Amino acid sequence: MTKHNISSIFLIFLLISTIILSVIRSVEAQNIEVYSESLTAISRITYNENNIIQKKDPEIKVVAFDSLKMPILMYHHIRDYNNSKDPIGTGLSVSPANFERNIKELIASGYTTISFNELIQHVQKGAPLPTKPIIISFDDGYDNNYINAYPIMKKYNQKGSFAIITGYVGNPGYMSWDNIKELKNNGNEIISHTVSHADLSTLSEESLKNQLGQSKKDLDTILGQNTETLIYPCGKYNQLVEKIALESGYKLARTTKYGTEITKNNLFELSTVRMTNSSSL
Ligand SMILES: [Zn+2]
């Protein structure tokens, strides 16, 4: 055999091995992808079927809840504010006059405001809901909610769901515990918006347990309630966030995604209707 032939055979061998190796690699890669995909699907299905209810309290039966179309309005600031240097703050502000207009429109359209807790009772036990239910939620716990929104809600006999960042209570611009207690004692609902408005999608399991568990514990203790609704800060969440939320005792969580459809499979991914200063119902 010539030197030339030996090197040709070696080259062909090398080529064939490379091809075989790359085929094996691509098959492996496919398998991993398929596997992790099915794993996600399985964990989702399991998680959704175990839904909230069965694991925590086996006596409570999930009634045949399937889906429901219902707007969950999302407000932040209720204030007169138009600052070109602060487009985000301006975008998150609805004037008291326009807020009052929204409340009038809502009543004229035949909506009845309910709480997240009533929604939970409906999902879990089949508790009846009004014909056209709607939730009015307020994110962040700003003091203008108490100063401006609360009197209007009271005037029209409507109730709101106020999402509180427990670590910010009493800070300048935020409601005090006294404000929050007054809201609660007058038919409004107080829900969790974590301890410090952290981006939950970036947190470790340990930090998540604190953000979700501690805020719930504080609200439960200070207000004498069982807080079961969570609003994700800036709508950020992932599967781990949902898992820790469920384990911390929450039964619903709202995102910032647009939508009005509530199904038994999206109770930890509830969508919302963002209200701006020019929104109407
Ligand atoms: Zn927020």
Image (cartoon, rainbow, N blue to C red):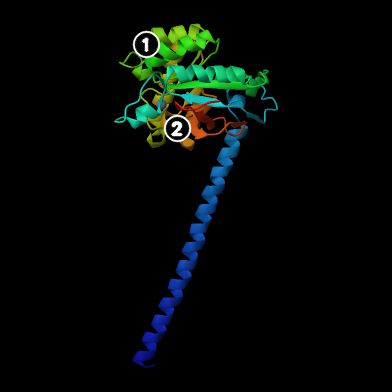
- In the displayed orientation, state which residue is furthest to the right: 64
- The residue that appears at 39% across and 15% down in the rendered structure is 144
Which amino acid, by three-letter code, is at mark 1?
Answer: Ser
For the question of whether residue 57 can be seen, the reply is: no
Q: Earlier in the sequence, mark 2 or mark 1?
A: 1
Q: How far across and down, in percent of the image, does residue 1 sit?
A: 39, 93
- The residue that appears at 58% across and 22% down in the rendered structure is 134
Quarter that holds the C terminus? top right
Which amino acid, by three-letter code, is at mark 2?
Answer: Gly
Q: Secondary structure at mark 1?
A: loop
For the residue pair 131 and 62, the one nearer the viewer reads as: 131
Question: Image quadrant of ligand 1?
Answer: top left
Query: Which quadrant of the structure image shows residue 202?
Result: top left
- The residue that appears at 49% across and 63% down in the rendered structure is 26
Q: Is residue 215 above or below residue 14?
A: above
What residue did someone put label 1 on?
176
Q: How far across and down, in percent of the image, does residue 156 sit?
A: 54, 10
What residue did someone put label 2 on?
235
Query: Which quadrant of the structure image shows residue 166?
Result: top left
Q: Is residue 134 above or below residue 7?
A: above
